[in-house]
């Protein structure tokens, strides 16, 4: 029996379609999509999000954000102007707010040749009207959004390649406009939000350690270096992967290379974030990369089935 959890929807892009999986209703094993959305013919989907009621989808291409109705018809579009012919190096990201009324879009405009810096833009999910626009002092390749499960604030991690990464947060206090925060780091990559929203997890850009921070201040609660997991810091590293298996247990992924075969390996360590105790390992087999493993915060976790659909597994088995 699955433990109770907050409704979650994840998406996968397969066969030129957006597949949405309702994790609140799904069991174990290979998951079947609850709904499938068809992007416009010819659109190369970069990122997507589907509302918890499965009635709305949004997706980005290199040059546009598109909103889809429940029947799959295009409800609205908003181009990123001017059009960019730069084919690589910029991947716009999107996310829906907790109430699914707002679409947050990270625009890597600097890399796309649209300006000197990037933008973070909020759109009305029904109409595509711009609600807020924030200029970011970054030149990023892509951005990862995390939505807080309780207060609805939104985190954004902007990756600038060799220059590091910058983490932002936007909150919308009652009766006020959005308030933007830039965290004082350029060397920490945002990995996951705890399911109770009390903290979040980052990994050093140089992959030397993992840290856990209090929400929303960013205060460091716990830091664990590579050697804390019994690994050689000269040869092994912390992957930009993992997350929270439960509110109190995190999955930290260590990686390295076999000295004899040259093959890469990954190990998924369990950490009690209350005490900082490093426990056993999660027996997870991933097919291609450590990023396939997605802890869901309710004691279950996802990998990828050979079909490309998510595969859900219980506990630490």
Image: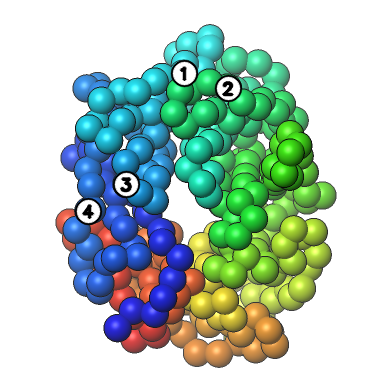
Q: Are marks 4 and 3 in contact (CB under 8 Å)?
A: no
SS for tag 3? loop
SS for tag 2? strand
| Other residues around mark 1 within 10 Å, as few (<14) / some (14–19) / many (≥20) | some
Residue 183 in the figure: left or right of residue 8: right
Q: Are marks 1 and 2 in contact (CB under 8 Å)?
A: yes
SS for tag 1? strand
Q: Which quadrant of the figure has residue 77?
A: top left
**In the rendered image, which quarter contains the C terminus?**
bottom left
Q: Which mark is residue 78?
A: 1
Q: Are marks 4 and 2 in contact (CB under 8 Å)?
A: no
| Other residues around mark 2 within 10 Å, as few (<14) / some (14–19) / many (≥20) | some
Q: Which mark is residue 130?
A: 2
Residue 300 is situated, as x and y percent measured from the top left of the image, at 39, 75
Pick whichever of labels 2 and 3 is earlier in the sequence. 3
Determine the CA span between mark 4 and mark 1: 27 Å
Residue at left offset 44%, top offset 28%: 126
Determine the CA span between mark 4 and mark 3: 11 Å
Determine the CA span between mark 2 and mark 3: 23 Å
Q: Which residue is mark 3?
A: 54
> Of the residues tagged 4 and 3, which is closer to the observer?
3
Residue 197 in the figure: left or right of residue 299: right
């Amino acid at each position: 029996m699955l433990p109770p959890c907050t409704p979650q929807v994840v998406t996968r892009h397969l066969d030129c379609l957006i597949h949405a999986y309702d994790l609140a209703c799904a069991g174990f094993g290979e998951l079947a999509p609850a709904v499938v959305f068809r992007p416009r013919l010819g659109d190369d989907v970069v990122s997507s999000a589907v509302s918890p009621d499965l009635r709305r989808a949004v997706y980005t291409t290199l040059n546009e954000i598109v909103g889809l109705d429940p029947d799959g018809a295009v409800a609205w579009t908003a181009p990123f102007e001017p059009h960019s012919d730069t084919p690589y190096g910029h991947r716009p990201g999107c996310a829906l707010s907790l109430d699914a009324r707002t679409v947050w879009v990270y625009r890597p405009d600097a890399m796309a040749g649209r300006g000197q810096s990037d933008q973070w833009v909020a759109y009305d999910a029904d109409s595509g009207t711009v609600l807020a626009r924030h200029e970011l002092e970054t030149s990023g390749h892509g951005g990862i959004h995390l939505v807080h499960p309780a207060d609805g604030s939104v985190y954004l991690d902007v990756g600038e390649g060799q220059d590091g990464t910058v983490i932002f947060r936007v909150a919308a206090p009652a009766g006020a406009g959005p308030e933007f925060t830039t965290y004082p780091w350029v060397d920490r990559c945002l990995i996951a939000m705890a399911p109770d929203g009390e903290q979040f997890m980052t990994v050093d850009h140089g992959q030397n350690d993992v840290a856990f921070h209090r929400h929303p201040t960013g205060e460091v609660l716990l830091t664990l270096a590579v050697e804390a997991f019994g690994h050689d810091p000269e040869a092994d590293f912390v992957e930009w992967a993992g997350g929270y298996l439960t509110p109190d247990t995190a999955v930290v992924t260590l990686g390295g290379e076999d000295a004899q075969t040259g093959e890469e390996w990954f190990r998924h360590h369990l950490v009690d974030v209350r005490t900082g105790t490093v426990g056993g390992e999660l027996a997870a087999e991933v097919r291609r990369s450590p990023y396939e493993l997605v802890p869901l915060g309710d004691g279950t976790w996802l990998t990828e089935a050979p079909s490309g659909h998510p595969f859900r597994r219980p506990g630490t088995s």
